[in-house]
Image: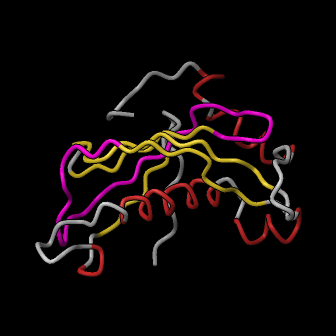
Amino acid sequence: MTAAPAIAADGVHRLVIRVYYEDTDAAGIVYHANYLKFAERGRTEFLRRLGFEHRKMRQATGLAFAVRHCRADYRKPARLDDELTVETRLAALGGASLEVEQAICRGGETLVRLDLRLACLSADGRAARLPAELRAALAPFSRQASGVSDSHGL
């Protein structure tokens, strides 16, 4: 497996994935819930690229992320064997949350757009402040702080 791609100068992390048979329905079209899995992989690799692996963060701090809100706009279907790019951009940093914009694209065309709010949770399931180290690593990529404009449907 190759290393995860870097976060681009425009603040977007891009992860290339392939659609496998297991991702599709009987017609060879990606099942709608699987886009959520693709997006999760994109967010995970974004954080990993910043040096924050979920397992290590949980072990060190007892903190984890949970999706609090997700809005998905399904525009066009992906199909078996398609090569997709999951684009992940941090939209905003809250005290105990992140707002993330994601697009799942094929050949530069946005197939699905997702807007998510992630809550940082303690081991007992309560909201917890983002660790200072994570906040510092994320801050340069926040659209609210950098004023970066939309691209590729993000």
Q: Image point 74% across, 43% down: which residue?
A: 137
Q: Left or right: where does residue 83 sit relative to residue 1? A: left
Percent position (x, y) of residue 21? 23, 80
Q: Image point 73% across, 72% down: which residue?
A: 55
Kindly give the residue lying farthest to the top in the view shown.
Answer: 147
Q: Quadrant of residue 73?
A: top left
Residue 92, above or below 103: above
Q: Image point 81% across, 48% down: which residue?
A: 127
Q: Left or right: where does residue 129 sit relative to residue 109? A: right
Q: Looking at the picture, tell me which residue is in the foreground, 68 or 62.
A: 68
Percent position (x, y) of residue 85? 34, 54
Percent position (x, y) of residue 37? 44, 65
Q: Is residue 102 magenta?
A: no
Figure quadrant of the C terminus: top left
Residue 70, above or below 47: above
The total number of labels drawn is 0
Q: Image point 79% across, 64% down: which residue?
A: 57
Q: Quadrant of residue 31?
A: bottom left
Q: Is residue 80 magenta?
A: yes
Residue 52, above or below 105: below
Q: Looking at the picture, tell me which residue is in the foreground, 70 or 133.
A: 70
Kindly give the residue lying farthest to the left in the view shown.
Answer: 27
Q: Left or right: where does residue 71 sit relative to residue 45? A: left
- The span shown in magenta is 73-98
Way the structure is coloured: secondary structure
Percent position (x, y) of residue 103? 37, 45
Q: Left or right: where does residue 114 sit relative to residue 53? A: left
